[in-house]
Each structure stands twice: as C-alpha cells, then as structure tokens.
Image (tube, rainbow, N blue to C red):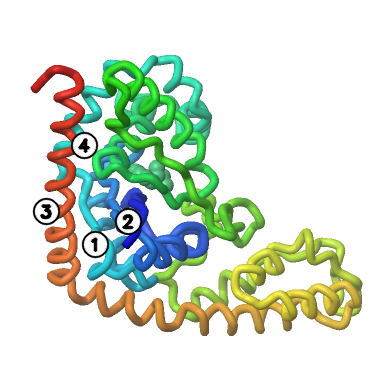
Amino acid sequence: MTRKPRVMSGMRPTGGLHLGHLFGVLTQWVRYCDEAEAYFEIADMHAYTTEFDDPERIRDARDDMVAGWLAAGVDPQKATIFLQSGVPEISELHVLLSMITPLSWLERVPTFKGQIDALGAHIATYGFLGYPLLQLCDIAIVRGEFVPVGRDQVAHLELGREIVRRFNHRYGDGREILVEPQPTLSEFPEVPGTDGRKMSKSYSNAILIADDADATAKKIRAMITDPQKVRRGDPGHPEVCPVFALWKLLAPVAQIETIASGCRAGTLGCADDKRSFTDALNAYLAPIRERYRTYRDDPAQVARIVEEGTARTREIAASVLADVKRALKLL
Ligand code: TRP
C-alpha cells in the first residue's frame, strides 16, 4: 500500500469561524481526513502575537473553534487535532531554527509590515517577527508535506521552505531531515465578505457559523449590490455584486448562470435574489450549525479529543526534534 501524504494545518483561536474559514480552508481539511494522514493545530501561541492583551479571549475561542471544525466535518477518528502550546517540542525547534533564520528573511515577509500598518506598532514584538518561523515549526514537527491554507498564508510557507532548505543543506549530510512544505489552496482561496472585501472578522463583513438564520438574513439584507442597479428592472452587473460572489460558494454552475443572466436582463431584482441566497445559505449551514451547538454543549468531549490528539502529536514531535538535535550535534 502506498503511504498517505502527511498533511498539516492550523488556525489561530481568535474568535468565530466564518464562511472564509469554511470554504477557504475547512473543506480541504475535511477531504484530507480521508486522503491523508492529517494533523490540525489550535495555534494558541500564534494568537498571542496579536492578542497578547486578552488571554481570556484566546482561551474561550479555543474550544469554540474546535467545535466549528468538528461541525464542518473534520473527523477526529481519522485526523489528529492538537494544541500548539501542548507540544513544547515546537517551541524548542523554534529556538533552534531561529539561529539559522536571517532577520532580513523575516522582515521581508509581507504580513510583517502589513499587519503592523493594519493593527499598529504595538504588535511589532520579537515573537510577531518570528510568526512565520513558528508556523514552519508547527508543520516541520510532524513532517507535514502539504499545508491546506488560504491565499494569505502562501508567503509564510515560502519562507518556511527556504529555512528547511538551509537547514538540510547545512546539517543534513545529504539527507532531508526536514520536509519542504507545499501549500494547497481550495477552490475559494479568498472568500469575499458581505462588503466584497476579503471576509475577515476585523472588517466586520463576516457571516459566522455561530450566527443563527435570522442574523444571517439580516447581514445579507444589508449588503450593497450593484450600485448602478437601483430599480428591479435596471440591468445589473453581477461581476461587481458581493451577493453574486457569495452565490459562487454554494450554487451549481447552471444556477449561477441563470442568476447572472436574470440580473443582467433586469428580470431578477436584488431583494428577491438576496432572499433566495439567504435561504440557500441557511439551508447549507443548518446541519453544520446544529452539530456546532452539539459540540459547544459538550466541552468535555472536545477536551478529550484535543488531549488525545496532543499526546499523539508529541510522540512524532519528539522523534523529529531528536533528528534535528542529532543533526546539530546537540545529541
Ligand atoms: N498562520 C495561520 C493563519 O493565520 C495559522 C497557522 C498557524 C497555520 N500555524 C500553522 C497554518 C501551520 C498552517 C500551518 O491562518
């Protein structure tokens, strides 16, 4: 039997899962539960890079996020779900690899300057600079080969591959001690929000798994459509309409074409279109929302899944760390 590929990915517990997580990342995770040996990480230490002021929030977001993963279909019988801070081997690997990571490589990762511009100079800590290195350590500690992520993470993996190459070249003695991780993108690597920008909690344009059907309807009703389509009979431009962009997540191609042509012809009005999109989205999310509530109401079960997964991860982490230390002549 051929070996299944090793897949690793993670998310920061910083608050409510939304359609961006669901269609950008979690659909891939669910598929990899069957097709790969998969490790999924609660990146709690990464959350402190930007939310160090609010440890309670990080703690609360933790089980909530895992409940969302399970609700989306991540199968803990097949995949390993683990807590980053529960695998200290990651932190040790981070210190070791920091010795061969040039400052200039970290400084030129676009999210470094980008997030400082967006969130303020107070986030520019030593730990924040090392964010993508820590991310590489998350992946490398289980020898992850494929990393299902959204488009914004691709630059982090590029840096990670460079560090792996440098490590193997200097210390590998012709062997690949660490694996170069490859990003994999879903059909929707960047999910648009209700305002057409990338869906993100910080833009207040997100539709959450935790929202109920009414809250979802309200958010969709408030969406701005094609500004040139004022009355129902006006011909519209679906390509500029954020409701149309969201339809693409759910509807089969034929239906998307019918909607586009109705909008262009002026026979489909925005209010009607929003109503039918609301129904379609709420129907899609209903079983996910129900499972989410079930897991939310059973924190002991979620805790057990994370504990078991973290223990499993530590076994492989210890062996990878030992390989790294042997290569560095520390063992
Ligand atoms: N940086 C990722 C994000 O913000 C989260 C993350 C942490 C991650 N560690 C990871 C993703 C390892 C993939 C692999 O989405």
Instruction: Give the Cα separation between the discs numbered 3 and 2.
Output: 22 Å
Classify 232 as above or below 9.
Answer: below
Please, what is the three-letter code of the amino acid marked with disc 2? Answer: Arg
On the image, the x and y values in percent for residue 314 come to: 14, 47
Contact flag, marks 4 and 3 (Cβ < 8 Å): no
Q: Residues within 10 Å of mark 2 (few under 14, many from 20)?
A: few
Instruction: Give the Cα separation between the discs numbered 4 and 1.
Output: 21 Å
| Location of mark 4 (residue) | 90
Looking at the image, is mark 4 or mark 3 earlier in the sequence?
Answer: 4
On the image, the x and y values in percent for residue 329 come to: 14, 17
Instruction: Give the Cα separation between the discs numbered 2 and 1.
Output: 32 Å
Number of the label disc, if any, that sits on residue 306: none
Tag 1's secondary structure?
helix
Number of the label disc, if any, that sits on residue 311: 3
| Location of mark 1 (residue) | 63
Quadrant (top left/top right/bottom left/bottom right) for the N terminus: bottom left
Image-quarter location of ligand 1: top left
Looking at the image, is mark 3 or mark 2 earlier in the sequence?
Answer: 2
| Location of mark 2 (residue) | 3
Q: Tell me which corner region of the image, top left, top right, bottom left or bottom right, holds residue 65.
A: bottom left
Please, what is the three-letter code of the amino acid marked with disc 1? Answer: Asp
Classify 274 as above or below 174.
Answer: below
Classify 70 as above or below 227.
Answer: below
Residue at 31% over, 16% down: 170
Q: Residues within 10 Å of mark 4 (few under 14, many from 20)?
A: many
Q: Nearer the viewer, residue 304 or 93?
A: 93
On the image, the x and y values in percent for residue 259 come to: 77, 77
Looking at the image, is mark 4 or mark 2 earlier in the sequence?
Answer: 2
Nearer the observer: mark 4 or 1; the answer is 4
Nearer the observer: mark 1 or 3; the answer is 3
Q: Can see residue 286?
A: yes
